[in-house]
């Protein structure tokens, strides 16, 4: 559906701005009026990572007058494969500051506002209220539901994107004109069911594909041109090089934007999404050891069986000495239980401790009462025991 422009046009464009945006100005659907609207727009990017990088760069190049950046993290070497707004020289710097420098390097006429803090229920309403449009580049379910609910409560449109391995999705959620994110996904997936990009990986260039779609949709909403992805989900398969669309209808029973909403204020989103299941939390209570404890057990030649529950490609990158690989799914299917030794203590680990806690719950229910897992996983091991090894 065509929608009215989100923002009013600015009073004028300077001579320098006319030269800079000339290729926009000669597009009939954009023209002077559309470019003035972009100049007057205030857009907030949640995250300056994989999706935030191309989004911020193209929003700046397009002439969006005010860009906000919510980001609390620092640039890590593993970011550079896809987070193209940062460079080698930015490793260790604030991502927000690094992104700001890149944005101003692209377009010095942009006003950049930094929010160097974690987006949470106690600050999201204040931050979002300062902007016309939100671009969501987050990679965890708790923040996605937080962004959605805040936008619905504030009646703000936002452009959503998601990436994983070779697959991407994008849509525009605006409860005044169509569905919200909860209409599409009423409940988060069970804890541990959907791996994050940090666990499952992502093709770097996929960020550009989905990020550019997000910026295209942002420009259309701001300037009131074209047919935005309101009520439609765009799905991209990079391996097959196929795009397809799925219609998303507004759910009259939606908990936040429905006819009788039950979510009328922000909630505890970490608890709602349950990063780790209750069973895993209970299993890990009193059965979590540190990497240093594991090293002491290895040195003392304790009777332990160290099991790595990650995927084979992760095991090839880095592993704990003596660990054998049995992927998490083998435990969930029940295939691995019969091969576990009865005369050794089982020590589980994964990348950071989330997946191993889920497997620990399976083992506890199967009678392996003395099984433990390593808090912090192989990443903790490298940081504390073998810092010369790579992390990912």
Image (cartoon, helix red, strand yellow):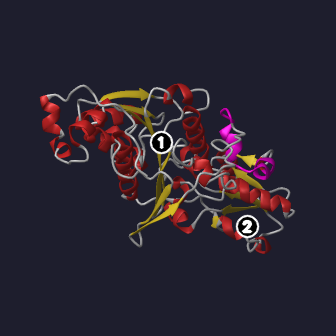
State the CA–CA distance, disc 2 to disc 1: 37 Å
Left or right of residue 336: residue 322:
left
The x, y position of residue 248, in whole percent, is 55, 57
Q: Residue 285's x, y, as percent?
A: 79, 45
Secondary structure beneath label 2: helix
Find residue 127 and report its horizontal and vertical position in percent: 50, 27
Looking at marks 2 and 1 on the same chain, the residue that comes earlier in the sequence is marked by 1
Residue placed under numbered mark 2 in the picture: 332
- Figure disc tally: 2
Is 109 in front, or is 149? Answer: 149
Q: Residue at x 57, y 48 (%)?
A: 181
Q: Answer whether labels 2 and 1 touch (C-beta < 8 Å).
A: no
Asked if residue 366 lies left or right of residue 281, the reply is: right
Q: How far from the left and from the top, in percent, is residue 224? A: 35, 43
Q: Residues within 10 Å of mark 2 (few under 14, many from 20)?
A: some
The one of 117 and 142 positioned closer to us in this rendering: 142
User: Disc 1 marks which residue?
Assistant: 158
> Which span is picked out in magenta?
264-283
Give the label on residue 270, or none. Answer: none
């Amino acid at each position: 559906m065509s929608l009215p422009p989100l923002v009013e046009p600015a009073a004028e464009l300077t001579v320098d701005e006319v030269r800079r945006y000339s290729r926009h100005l000669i597009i009939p659907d954009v023209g002077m009026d559309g470019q003035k609207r972009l100049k007057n727009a205030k857009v907030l990017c949640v995250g300056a990572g994989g999706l935030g990088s191309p989004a911020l760069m193209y929003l700046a190049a397009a002439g969006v007058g005010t860009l906000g950046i919510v980001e609390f993290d620092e640039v890590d070497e593993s970011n550079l494969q896809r987070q193209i707004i940062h460079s080698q020289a930015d490793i260790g710097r604030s991502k927000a500051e690094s992104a700001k420098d890149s944005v101003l390097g692209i377009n010095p006429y942009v006003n950049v506002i930094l929010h160097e803090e974690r987006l949470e229920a106690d600050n999201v309403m204040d931050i979002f209220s300062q902007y016309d449009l939100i671009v969501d580049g987050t990679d965890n379910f708790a923040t996605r539901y937080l962004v959605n609910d805040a936008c619905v409560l504030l009646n703000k449109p936002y452009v959503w994107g998601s990436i994983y391995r070779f697959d991407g999705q994008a849509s525009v959620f605006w409860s005044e004109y169509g569905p919200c994110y909860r209409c599409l996904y009423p409940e988060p997936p069970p804890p541990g069911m959907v791996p994050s990009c940090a666990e499952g990986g992502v093709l770097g260039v996929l960020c550009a594909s989905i990020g550019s779609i997000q910026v295209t949709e942002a420009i259309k909403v701001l300037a009131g041109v074209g047919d935005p992805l309101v009520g439609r989900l765009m799905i991209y398969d990079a391996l097959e090089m196929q795009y397809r669309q799925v219609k998303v209808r507004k759910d009259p029973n939606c908990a936040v934007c429905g006819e009788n909403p039950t979510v009328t204020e922000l909630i505890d989103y970490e608890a709602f999404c349950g990063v780790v299941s209750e069973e895993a939390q209970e299993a890990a209570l009193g059965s979590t050891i540190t990497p240093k404890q594991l090293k002491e057990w290895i040195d003392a030649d304790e009777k332990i069986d160290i099991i790595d529950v990650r995927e084979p490609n992760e095991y090839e990158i880095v592993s704990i000495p003596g660990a054998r690989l049995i992927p998490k799914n083998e435990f969930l299917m029940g295939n691995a239980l019969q091969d576990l030794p009865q005369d050794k203590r089982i020590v589980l680990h994964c990348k950071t401790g989330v997946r191993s806690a889920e497997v620990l719950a399976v083992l506890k229910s199967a009678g392996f009462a003395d099984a433990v897992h390593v808090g912090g996983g192989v990443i903790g091991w490298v940081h504390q025991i073998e810092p010369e090894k790579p992390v990912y």
